[in-house]
Image (spheres, rainbow, N blue to C red):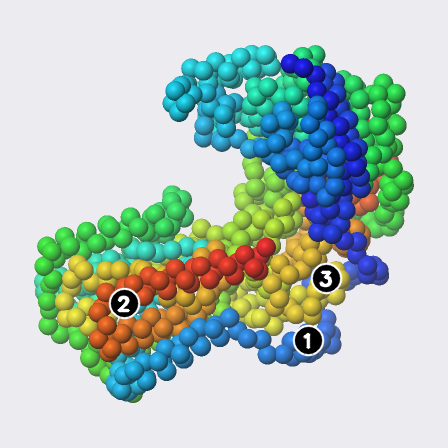
């Protein structure tokens, strides 16, 4: 395989009128591994998706070997030997491991009969090279998340990639699996493949990459040989000047409740987290910080009864673990899920109904006769308190509001419901900066009133800005706990990457 | 990652901390007044059903011109009588579709309830026993559907397609394939308590009133809309999704019992072919009336207009001596156009 050189110059891309890549360069040579770093929203995924032909750039000069392009499409990227492993699974879960490895280019006899033997042989070869043992005939749906990820990787690897792009491939992998993957990636590099490796984990950079490029707010912050940067230099390059403005909230001038509202005791959930002890008392905001696959989101799910612990104990306000969402609400827990559109809002329904949903019985006559006027009152009240910006129309569908204002409506839902405990997952994902600050201020205000707040997030700035305490999870283990002004962006990043 | 860039918010954040306790009384009336002023300023909003009313009006005008008997009171009452049975079924069907569910078994369901009614009546049971048995059987069918959909977890379309066949087979078994005629019980169809309108139409009216009440005024009705709009979010907001849908199917079964009695009263027999194809007409009327296949949208008012449109087309085409097979063609085309319209609307509003 001849070594290939990929060069991208001046890549620009806008979404909805906002430029997210301001003319970014990227070089990776065959036989080397480039680590691409950057915080959420820096433009890493957008950049590699342009290289893989998923997005078309507004402007770009891309050269792969001798061929030059102004934009790629999935077909030309494939023809150029670019293979990408996405963060989200794209496997066919009912098909077998062997079939998934060959998905999209099944080996055939006489042009159309699928050859099972060849398929199995191909899968066996690549999995063997990766040093991974999997049942070739098992349906992918029966595998653990980490194993599914490996099958995804095997698919890209078996496809004779010249340029291999991996977008945070290790989020769901165990330590041994990561080791095996790294060994294999080094082998590929030595065979002349160019590898672009996106990660949040700084320890992986040193272990794997020859060169490193850090993106920040759509620009290249630094680029160079891995050896020429230490950890602190990379962290500051990622955070940049903007992070200096990330301030801590005002110190707490109120007392915490005596009894914990949420109490995890040596809690474990198979495949997600293990041996986590954590208590949230009324009046404080506790952040669980961790990247995808760290177990932080699953921990939040457990507190709302969406998943059951397989180990240890969970107590909500001195009572047992919730058996489901309705039971959790009865116990006094409100929940703001990560995916607002698919899990939180009723898009076509009026905003006022979106606020009143869990409070319908209380707002009704005799607990079943809806009173529209109480719904509107409730909405108007929270609209004022949380600064929900909309036409002054409680009956407009919530989908007509901006993301930040939708999120305020979801928050208002639980304030109206009056739950003393609130669990939030990624509370400001897709929320603009202004609304974000307001949401944080509202959360602090709720803690002041005695609400116990548990927030699972992968956004470290968010943790710094609102949390009284922060626990860091990585690969399902509680790494450290930071309190008060010890919560800093560099502290969080270092702990999660370690 | 950067796929969702958001414009910076130009409005300064002067948000004071939300103070006071969460259960404090509602804010001063000024905010409310503001809301209502905004409502007034927004002016008259054309309701979505306006287009339907225009279609209805155009049909009325067209047939009034083409046929001199169309606009007579007797004929208009005929239209109402013709849609009454299907209308009774369409009321809970609207509730189910609002929650994103279907009940296709209503067609053969009324065959089953009317046949068992006729069987009991002709085998020495009193009228009241037969009536209660028919209603009970309809509800039992609804319970079966609800159980299969919410507890076992089978898709509603497939479940009720299956029970559609089952009920039809059972009805034929009861009658041995020959309609069972009976005497008496013509009351629902023949007695006209007021305005020269028979009981069947008044029962339909009662279903309309009851359904409007349930959908607009009760927590149950609201929950149906919420489930249809976003089932996951409904669950996460504490709505008991399974129970609510289950209740919807039981209501549909109740309507099947009543509609079966009306059909039996109108024909004076229990026949295995009663109600054949009604499921299609019911779904057409509900979707024509503005209910979204995706759930979360729909109203009884719209459904009633949809029913009237279908009823008037049937009636008018008959008066004009158009072959009755054309009515099926028209009904099918209307269903497809209504669904197509819904798809386009969804793309426009939720893109």
Name the residue located 44 percent from the left edge and 73 percent from the top edge.
B52
Mark 3 → mark 2, Cα distance in angstroms: 51 Å
Q: Are marks 3 and 2 in contact (CB under 8 Å)?
A: no
Mark 3 → mark 1, Cα distance in angstroms: 16 Å
- Marks 3 and 2 share the same chain: no
The x, y position of residue A481, in whole percent, is 78, 32
Q: Are marks 3 and 1 in contact (CB under 8 Å)?
A: no
Residue A141 shows up from this direction: yes
Residue A262 shows up from this direction: no
The front one of B306 and B142 is B306
- Marks 1 and 2 share the same chain: yes
| Label number found at residue B82 | none
According to the image, label 1 marks what residue?
B38
The x, y position of residue B286, in whole percent, is 39, 64
| Label number found at residue B327 | 2
Name the residue located 76 percent from the left edge and 44 percent from the top edge.
A20
Name the residue located 88 percent from the left edge and 20 percent from the top edge.
A228
Mark 1 vs mark 2, foreground winner is 2
- Marks 3 and 1 share the same chain: no
- Judged left or right of residue A180, residue A104 is left
User: The N terminus of chain A lies in which quarter of the figure?
Assistant: top right
The front one of B158 and A62 is A62
Mark 3 vs mark 1, foreground winner is 1
Residue A219: name its quadrant.
top right
The front one of B281 and A407 is B281
Chain letter for mark 2, please.
B
The x, y position of residue B315, in whole percent, is 27, 75
Chain letter for mark 3, please.
A
Please tell me whether mark 3 sits on a helix, a strand or a loop.
loop
According to the image, label 3 marks what residue?
A388
Residue B94: name its quadrant.
bottom left
């Amino acid at each position: 395989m001849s070594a290939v050189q990929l060069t991208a110059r001046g890549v620009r891309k806008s979404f909805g009128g906002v430029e997210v890549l301001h003319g970014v360069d990227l070089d990776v040579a065959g036989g080397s591994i480039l680590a691409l770093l950057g915080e959420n929203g820096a433009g890493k995924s957008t950049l590699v998706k342009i290289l893989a032909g998923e997005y078309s750039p507004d402007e770009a000069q891309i050269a792969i070997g001798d061929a030059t392009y102004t934009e790629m499409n999935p077909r030309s990227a494939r023809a150029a030997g670019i293979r990408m492993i996405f963060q989200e699974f794209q496997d066919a879960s009912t098909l077998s491991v062997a079939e998934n490895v060959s998905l999209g280019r099944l080996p055939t006899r006489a042009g159309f009969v699928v050859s099972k033997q060849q398929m199995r042989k191909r899968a066996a070869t690549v999995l063997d090279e990766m040093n991974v043992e999997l049942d070739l005939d098992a349906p992918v749906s029966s595998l653990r998340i980490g194993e599914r990820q490996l099958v995804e990787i095997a698919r890209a690897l078996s496809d004779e990639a010249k340029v291999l792009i991996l977008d945070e491939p290790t989020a769901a992998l165990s330590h041994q699996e990561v080791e095996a993957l790294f060994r294999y990636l080094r082998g590929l590099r030595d065979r002349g493949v160019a590898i672009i490796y996106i990660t949040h984990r700084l320890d992986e950079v040193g272990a794997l990459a020859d060169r490193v490029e850090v993106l920040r707010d759509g620009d290249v912050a630094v680029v160079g040989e891995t050896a020429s940067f230490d950890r602190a230099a990379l962290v500051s390059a990622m955070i940049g000047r903007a992070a200096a403005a990330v301030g801590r909230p005002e110190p707490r001038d109120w007392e915490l409740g005596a009894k914990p509202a949420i109490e995890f005791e040596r809690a474990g959930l198979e495949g997600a987290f293990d041996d986590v002890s954590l208590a949230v008392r009324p009046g404080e905001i506790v952040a669980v910080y961790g990247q995808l696959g760290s177990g932080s989101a699953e921990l939040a799910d457990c507190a709302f009864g969406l998943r059951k612990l397989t180990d240890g104990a969970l107590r909500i306000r001195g009572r047992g673990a919730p058996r489901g969402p309705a039971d959790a609400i009865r116990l006094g827990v409100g929940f703001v899920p990560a995916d607002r559109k698919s899990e939180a809002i009723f898009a076509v329904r009026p905003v006022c109904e979106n606020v009143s949903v869990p409070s319908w019985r209380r707002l009704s006559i005799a607990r079943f006769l809806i009173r529209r006027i109480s719904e509107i009152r409730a909405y108007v009240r929270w609209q004022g308190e949380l600064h929900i910006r909309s036409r002054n129309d409680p009956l407009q569908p919530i989908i007509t509001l901006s993301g930040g204002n939708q999120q305020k409506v979801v928050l208002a839902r639980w304030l109206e419901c009056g739950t003393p405990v609130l669990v939030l997952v990624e509370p400001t994902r897709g929320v603009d900066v202004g609304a974000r600050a307001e949401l944080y201020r509202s959360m602090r205000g709720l803690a002041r009133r005695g609400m116990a707040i548990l927030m699972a997030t992968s956004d470290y700035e968010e943790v710094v800005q609102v949390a009284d305490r922060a626990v860091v999870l990585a690969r399902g283990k509680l790494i450290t706990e930071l309190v008060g002004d010890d919560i800093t962006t560099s502290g969080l990043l270092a702990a999660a990457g370690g | 990652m950067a796929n969702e860039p958001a414009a910076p918010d130009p409005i300064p954040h002067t948000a004071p901390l939300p103070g006071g306790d969460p259960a404090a009384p509602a804010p001063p009336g000024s905010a409310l007044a503001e809301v209502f002023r905004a409502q007034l300023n927004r002016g008259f909003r054309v309701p979505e059903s306006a287009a339907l009313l225009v279609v209805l009006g155009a049909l009325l005008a067209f047939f009034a011109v083409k046929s001199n008997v169309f606009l007579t009171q007797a004929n208009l009452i005929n239209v109402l009588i013709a849609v009454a049975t299907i209308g009774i079924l369409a009321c809970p069907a609207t509730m189910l579709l609002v929650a994103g569910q279907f009940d296709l078994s209503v067609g053969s369901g009324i065959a089953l309830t009317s046949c068992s009614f006729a069987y009991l009546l002709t085998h020495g049971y009193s009228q009241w026993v037969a009536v209660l048995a028919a209603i009970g059987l309809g509800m039992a069918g609804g319970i079966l559907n609800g159980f299969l959909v919410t507890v076992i977890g089978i898709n509603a379309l497939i479940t009720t397609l299956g029970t559609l066949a089952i009920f039809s087979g059972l009805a034929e078994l009861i009658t041995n394939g020959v309609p069972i005629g009976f005497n008496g019980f013509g009351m629902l169809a023949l007695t006209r308590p007021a305005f020269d309108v028979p009981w069947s139409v008044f029962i339909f009216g009662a279903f309309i009133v009851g359904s409007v009440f349930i959908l607009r005024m009760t927590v149950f009705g609201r929950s149906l809309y919420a489930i249809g709009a976003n089932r996951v979010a409904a669950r996460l907001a504490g709505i008991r999704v399974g129970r609510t849908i289950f209740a919807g199917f039981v209501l549909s079964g109740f309507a099947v019992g009543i509609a079966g009695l009306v059909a039996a009263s109108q024909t004076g027999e229990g026949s295995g072919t009663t109600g054949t194809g009604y499921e299609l007409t019911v779904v057409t009327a509900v979707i024509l009336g503005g209910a979204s296949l995706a759930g979360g949208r729909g109203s009884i008012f719209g459904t009633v207009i949809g029913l009237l449109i279908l009823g008037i087309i049937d009636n008018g085409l008959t008066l004009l001596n158009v072959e009755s097979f054309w009515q099926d063609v028209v009904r099918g085309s209307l269903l497809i156009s209504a669904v197509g319209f819904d798809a386009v609307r969804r793309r426009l509003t939720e893109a």
